[in-house]
Amino acid sequence: MPAAKPLSAGAPELAPLGEWIPVVLWGALIFTLSTSAFSATNTGKIIDPILRWLIPGITAASVDVCHMLVRKCAHFTEYGILFWLLVRGPMAQRPYLALMLCVVYALTDEGHQVFVPGRTASLYDVALDSTGALFSHFLNTAIAEIA
């Protein structure tokens, strides 16, 4: 039986392809949420009635603000989960590369929205997405310290 090869101290090993499946599926979900079907007009048809039911007597201006906050929280959360999937899977030993990948995906996702009717690209959304990923990094680091 041949002796096992020692691991080199060079480049980290590539992750098995199966570890990328959750990341790719989540990326596809983010891409889908960037389509016209999830424009503010369309999400308002769902979120606004829920807000009016939860908070009877809410003003139209307050509904608009809450609707916007729900949408922005979704940005933050989507990329927080993306980062978490990356560092719990294929990029377990490379959190900064995972963070960079999240930022690049946020940029490409917003770029995609330039071509989608009813959607607009925003660097503020890229910053919000990146902040969600960074917050996830902080949580992941804090949890690792506790454990």
Image (cartoon, rainbow, N blue to C red):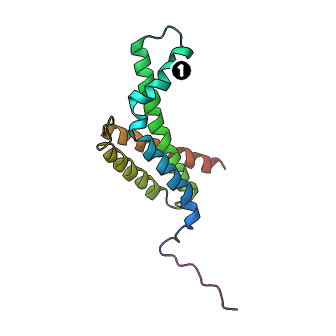
Residue furthest out toward the bottom: 1
The kind of secondary structure element at disc 1 is helix
> Is residue 59 one of those drawn in magenta?
no
Category of crowding for the residue at label 1, using alpha-carbon neighbours closer than 10 angstroms: few (below 14), some (14–19), many (at least 20): few
Three-letter code, disc 1 = Ile
- Would you place residue 24 above or below residue 65 in this image? below
Tell me what residue is drawn at x 45 percent, y 56 percent. Answer: 96
Residue furthest out toward the top: 57
Tell me what residue is drawn at x 53 percent, y 13 percent. Answer: 55
In this rendered view, identify the residue nearer to me: 76 or 114: 114
> Is residue 8 one of those drawn in magenta?
yes
Residue furthest out toward the right: 1
The overriding secondary structure of the stretch rendered in magenta is loop
- Would you place residue 22 above or below residue 12 in this image? above
Tell me what residue is drawn at x 57 percent, y 78 percent. Answer: 7
Q: Quadrant of the N terminus?
A: bottom right
In this rendered view, identify the residue nearer to me: 41 or 108: 41
Q: How many marks?
A: 1
Residue 11 showing in the rendered view: yes
- Would you place residue 13 above or below residue 126 in this image? below
Residue furthest out toward the left: 114
Q: Position of residue 73 (x, y in %)?
A: 47, 33
Q: Position of residue 98 (x, y in %)?
A: 46, 56
Return the residue at label 1: 50
| Left or right, residue 136 beside residue 122 | right
Q: Position of residue 31 (x, y in %)?
A: 43, 47
Q: Position of residue 12 (x, y in %)?
A: 51, 70
Residue 92 showing in the rendered view: no
The residue stretch that appears in magenta:
1-9
In this rendered view, identify the residue nearer to me: 72 or 57: 57
In this rendered view, identify the residue nearer to me: 79 or 24: 24
